[in-house]
Amino acid sequence: MVRELVPYAFWQRVAPLLPPPRPKKKLGLPRADDRAALEAIVFALRSGIPWEMLPRKQFGLSGMTAWRRLKEWTRADVWEQLQARLLDGLGLRGKVDLSRASIDSSSVRASKKGAPTGPSPTDGAKAGSKHHHLVEAHGLPLTESVTAANVHDTHELFPLVDSVPAVRMPSGQRRFRPAKVHGDKAYASRKNRLGLRLRGVAPRIARPGVESKERLGRYRWVVERTLTWKNQLRRLRARDERRDDVHFGFLVLGCCVMLLRRLFPDIC
């Protein structure tokens, strides 16, 4: 069965979040259809195709139009709002487990230098960016960020924990933070453990010579699986955008696609 790029259930959740179009100019072509633009963006996300090679006949708009729409919607925080609503939908169904969360990152090579990029310590100092993810107990993405590849993981711990959206649980109440956060030795410091406790979060961070990575890794493997899911979206295997907002928009949209697959496994 061939699945739609943007099933109706997907579009139904995106459409109310889109900003109103700008006033129509007297001259020029009419504005391209928003759903067709979203389909083109999702196609680029999944296939990794360059914008200039986007098949215009298939979507009825050019790659540049799709790029501009992605930039416009990213600036309007459409993807972050969508992610929060999808987490609410999953939370009401009892599919979001905030008893624990895991944090990790992965580096991607940047073909076009732009902010934020930096020399990657894992890729021969080539320019790259780093994707940071915080996921719940089953690996569903809660929040994410992008930094230069040479930024240490520990710097994103508190920004990610603090940016977790308040998720509505089956009881109807909202939960603001996970009870525990699991991280590898990159996050090991007294400052991080204290900062988590002050936020009401129990730190479960591997400490050199104290806690084995095998024991704590029983829970952390879910974030590694999420990073694998992310890399199935070819546009996120490398950074091909010079603009940081466009690249971040792709990253958050990719996380929304993961949530949609969990919410609607038969159609997404």
Image: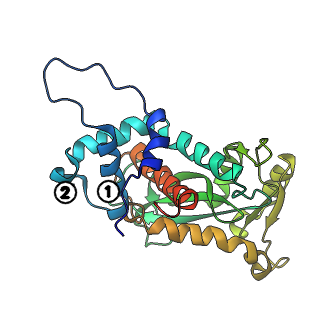
Could you tell me which quadrant the N terminus lies in?
bottom left
- In x, y percent, where is residue 68? 30, 39
Q: Check disc 1 and give the amino acid type.
A: Ala
**Between 140 and 130, which is closer to the camera in this rendering?**
140
At a point 36% along the width and 56% down the height, the residue shown is: 5
**Between 83 and 133, which is closer to the camera in this rendering?**
83
Is 107 left, or right, of 158 in this rendering? left
Tag 2 residue: 53
Q: Quadrant of residue 112?
A: bottom left
Question: Vertically, is 99 above or below 170?
Answer: below
**Mark 1 surroundings: few (<14), some (14-19) or many (≥20) residues within 10 A:** many
**Mark 2 surroundings: few (<14), some (14-19) or many (≥20) residues within 10 A:** few
Tag 1 residue: 44
Q: Check disc 2 and give the amino acid type.
A: Met
At a point 70% along the width and 71% down the height, the residue shown is: 220
Residue 121 seen from this side: no
- Numbered disc 2: secondary structure: helix
Is 193 left, or right, of 90 in this rendering? right
- In x, y percent, where is residue 110? 38, 60
At a point 48% along the width and 56% down the height, the residue shown is: 257
At a point 32% along the width and 57% down the height, the residue shown is: 43
Q: Kindly give the residue lying farthest to the left in the view shown.
A: 27
Of label 2 and label 1, which has the lower sequence position? 1
- In x, y percent, where is residue 132? 58, 58
Residue 84 seen from this side: yes
- In x, y percent, where is residue 165? 67, 43
- The CA span between labels 2 and 1 is 10 Å
Question: Vertically, is 228 above or below 177?
Answer: below
- Numbered disc 1: secondary structure: helix
